[in-house]
Amino acid sequence: MSPVDRDRHAEYRARAERARKLGFTGVYDVRGRGGVRAATDVRSLDLHDALPPAAREARIGSLHAVADVRAGVPEEVALRRAGIDEATARTWLREAWDRPADRELRPMLAITRDGLVPATPRGSRAASTIAEHAAAVGHYLRTGDASGLARFRGVRVARMLLETRTAVLDRLAAAGALAVEDLYRG
């Protein structure tokens, strides 16, 4: 195709649509952040917090989708649950999508002696530990069975000690400090 035959308007519309799928307002929002590669490279909490809300939601959706895929959920189902397409997930997570574990930054909430505290684990294994601990706490609060908490005694994730003392968990639950729908914070 010669330069004269190019449909620049169609190319621009395609780039703008891609930017919107990634959660940005448009082409110039992405361009102002240094391009797609730089805009989707979230290496610190400051960079994560600087993302537009829709971009944060797309990134967190990508993290949910990759966690589901690693847990054995078919890729199409995981992407549908997260509300994103494969290209969006691959753009946010790059090579982490195809690996069994990653070192992506995940702003989450961890259960400590102070209640739900913002934590920033770097990696899927640390994030899984926080999620498994939250599931064990939820199981204890529903059933009174504290056996699942034993494996988290003395465990630190993202420089935070995960709470396993049942008296403290009961106190936090009574105060309403453990009510959370999603461990990922936007």
Image: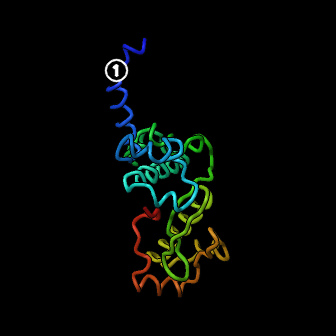
Tell me the quadrant of the picture where the C terminus can be found.
Answer: bottom left
Rendered image coloring scheme: rainbow
Which residue is rendered at x = 57% and y = 59% of the image? 44
Q: Which residue is mark 1?
A: 7
Secondary structure found at label 1 = loop
Q: How many marks?
A: 1
Q: Position of residue 110 (x, y in %)?
A: 53, 71
Which residue is pictured at 44% across the width and 42% down the height? Answer: 31
The residue shown at (44%, 55%) is 51
| Left or right for 102, reference 111 | right
Residue 108 in the image: above or below residue 116: above
Q: Which image quarter: residue 5?
A: top left
Spot occupied by residue 92 in the image (x, y as percentages of width and height): 50, 45
**Frontmost residue, 92 versus 153:** 92
- The spot of residue 97 in percent (x, y) is 56, 42
The quadrant of the picture occupied by the N terminus is top left
Q: Quarter-wise, where is residue 78 in the image?
A: top left
Q: Is residue 1 above or below residue 40?
A: above
Seen from this angle, which residue lies furthest right? Answer: 154
Rendered position, 51 above or below 73: below
Looking at the rendered structure, the kind of residue marked 1 is Asp
The picture places residue 171, in percent across and down from the top left corner, at 47, 87
Q: Residues within 10 Å of mark 1 (few under 14, many from 20)?
A: few
Left or right: 131 as drawn, with respect to 125: left
Q: Is residue 114 depicted above or below 106 in this figure?
A: below
